Amino acid sequence: MRYAAPPLGNLRFRAPQNPLKEKQTQDATSHGSVCLSVPQKYSVLQTTSEDCLFIDVQAPASANSSSKLPVMIWFQGGAYILNLNADYNATGLIQASSDNFIVVTFNYRVGLFGFLASQDVKNDGDLNAGLSDQRKAIIWVHNHISAFGGDPERVTLFGTSAGAGGVLLHTLAYGGENTSKPLFSAAISADPFVPEIFPYQRLEFQYQEILNATNCSSLECLRHLPTDSLLAANINRPFPRQTTSPLFYFSPCVDGIFFPDLPSKLLADGRFQRVPLLQGTVTDEGSIFAATANNTDVDQFDEFLSAQFPDLDTDGIDVQYSYIPLNTTSQAYYNRASFAYGDVSYTCYGLSFAAAFASANLPGIVPVVQAYWTSFARAHDPNVWRLEGSPEWKTWGSGQRLKIQTNSTAMEMVDRQQIENCEFWAARNSQVYH
């Protein structure tokens, strides 16, 4: 189903608008097209199109308009450059809850279609259009999910990777300000990826490079280009003063509206929506990304990090991670690059949210995974319907986290070295724009 009008023509680079009202029966038996990705970097198996703002509702066959089932909205990942899990099949998750909730999935714009930033876009368009798509989908659920048997007062956002990061970012949206009725009541963030969130003015160079690559001189020209012409320009390029392209080029920005300030500043100031939060991270998250670059010596290690974070002072990073032995076979600094990138882009971001939410005097809530998640969506407590024999998931205030491992899931203390690494990166939030 459409949750927004096709973002084409004059609606390109604008916040999503309401779809046209349909008086006829709509065919909703197949998935809509997936949003266009950065083609030179990744590809998806599904049909892609610029006309992609579709939403799916997966509900038990027994659900009706009076069921009032809790709802989970799935935020797919893809590093803001592709829709990675567009046709997420929630059958197993719904069955794990004994058919006691509804799952909603949706597409949102990525790459330059969702995150082109410049003064021109701010003046005659909308910054963070991809995040506005996400917000529009949440509003659609709030307004229409009761017709499918869902309860708009019990909506949980959940996702992994950039989807998990998006979940966290929506708790910060508009500095924590909300509508008169909250749009969601809980959040599950499994392994959040959050890239640099630059002030939009810093991204003017991206806009100029797109104009040059397309032989355009204005935003209006870009709006009238064929999709294929824009897609050809939707590629990674090095940041200014860098020689290597970053892993991920397009991302959300501080626009003064959706984000009044850097996320770390909003967190520190308590400007976030206070909802129950279930937060997780993944071991060795940075390894797949460090493998994309040569990390043979300390200079290449610094170059890899500088390509991702162009304002980062790399002095001291090697010392901070000196406890990790150098590889003796190849790419001596691979492990250190893996840990450093994983910490700054994933682990520490999640821990900072856990700490902020734990100090907000929320009720005591803090998965094996399906049981914890579905219990959390139903009761805002992962323990009520957890699997028999699985440990109690204690709140973050205890300084412990749940380590999920085959046949040995248990609570564990966060080790001191991890805390020191995150303190190291927290002192550099202004350099990595977190």
Image: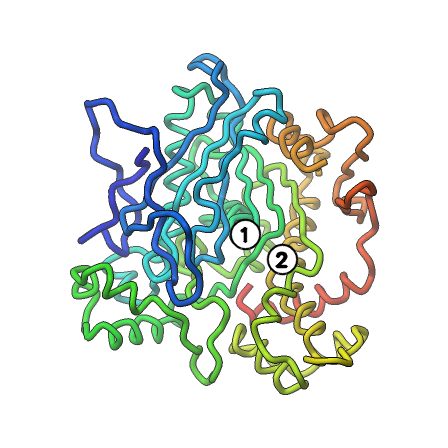
Residue located 49% across and 39% down the image: 88
Which quadrant of the view contains residue 94? top right
Secondary structure category for the residue under label 2: helix
Q: Position of residue 316 (x, y in %)?
A: 70, 81
Q: Amino acid at mark 1?
A: Gly
Q: Position of residue 53 (x, y in %)?
A: 33, 43
* Left or right of 175 on screen, residue 428: right
Tell me which label, 1 or 2, sits earlier in the chain: 1
Which quadrant of the view contains residue 398? top right
Residue pointed to by mark 1: 165
Question: Tag 1: Cα neighbours inside 10 Å, few (<14), some, or many (≥20)?
Answer: many
Which quadrant: the C terminus? bottom right
* Left or right of 305 on screen, residue 131: left
Residue located 44% across and 78% down the image: 238
Q: Tell which of 193 and 99 is nearer to you.
A: 99
Q: Are marks 1 and 2 in contact (CB under 8 Å)?
A: yes
Which quadrant: the N terminus? top left
Question: Tag 2: Cα neighbours inside 10 Å, few (<14), some, or many (≥20)?
Answer: many
Which mark identifies residue 20? Answer: none
Residue pointed to by mark 2: 349
